[in-house]
Image (spheres, grey):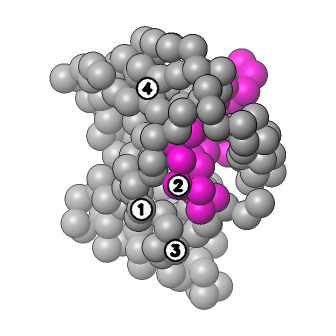
Amino acid sequence: MDVLKHPNPALRQPADPVDPESDTDLATLVKRMAQAMYDAPGIGLAATQLGIQKRVVVFDLEEGLQALCNPVITVASDETAVDDEGCLSLPGISVPIARSVRVVCEAQTIDGEPLSIQAQDLLARLLQHEIDHLDGKLIIDRASPEERREAIRRYNDILEGRAQPDEAS
């Protein structure tokens, strides 16, 4: 499966909750998502990035594949950090984004078991990024107006062959 690229309108659609106990396609979906993420290559992927409007994300921070259903950030630290973020749906660019450095994410496994993740640093950033996708948001929506304009200009230049992709993305 190919990862959808901006400006595909499906990326702007909020995802629907899933019922892991009755959705018999979840295991297959997670496998397809993982394959697309690894092929890209990336460290995280939301189902919406494949045009599937289900609240499912996968990620792998070199600790093995993780899949979450219906993830939601329930606690976010006031302390934030700005770091460059790339996105498989905006390939070739990175944008400085402020995110909470610590979060608590409540979710379910694909078997329907409740799960609570206390995350910090890169995992906290990744969870916020992927949940943004499930809500129809992209990294350019979190950027300042000036950074957003510059990011879209760079992205269009890359698509049209007038620029090389950022090294950080």
Q: Which of marks 4 and 2 is nearer the N terminus?
A: 2
The amino acid at mark 3 is Asn
Real-space Cα distance between discs 4 and 3? 26 Å
In the rendered structure, which segment of residues is drawn in magenta? 42-67
| Residue 8 disc label | 3
Where does residue 104 sit, x and y in percent of width and height?
37, 17
Q: What residue type is labelled 1?
A: Gln
Amino acid type, label 2: Gln
Q: Position of residue 151 (x, y in %)?
A: 41, 68
Alpha carbon separation for disc pair 4 and 1: 23 Å
Q: Out of 161 and 41, give the one closest to the viewer.
A: 41
Which residue is denoted by mark 4 in the rendering? 124
Of labels 4 and 3, earlier in sequence is: 3
Residue in the image at 41% along x and 20% along y: 106
The residue mark sitting in front, 4 or 2, is 2
Left/right placement of residue 16 relative to residue 28 reads left
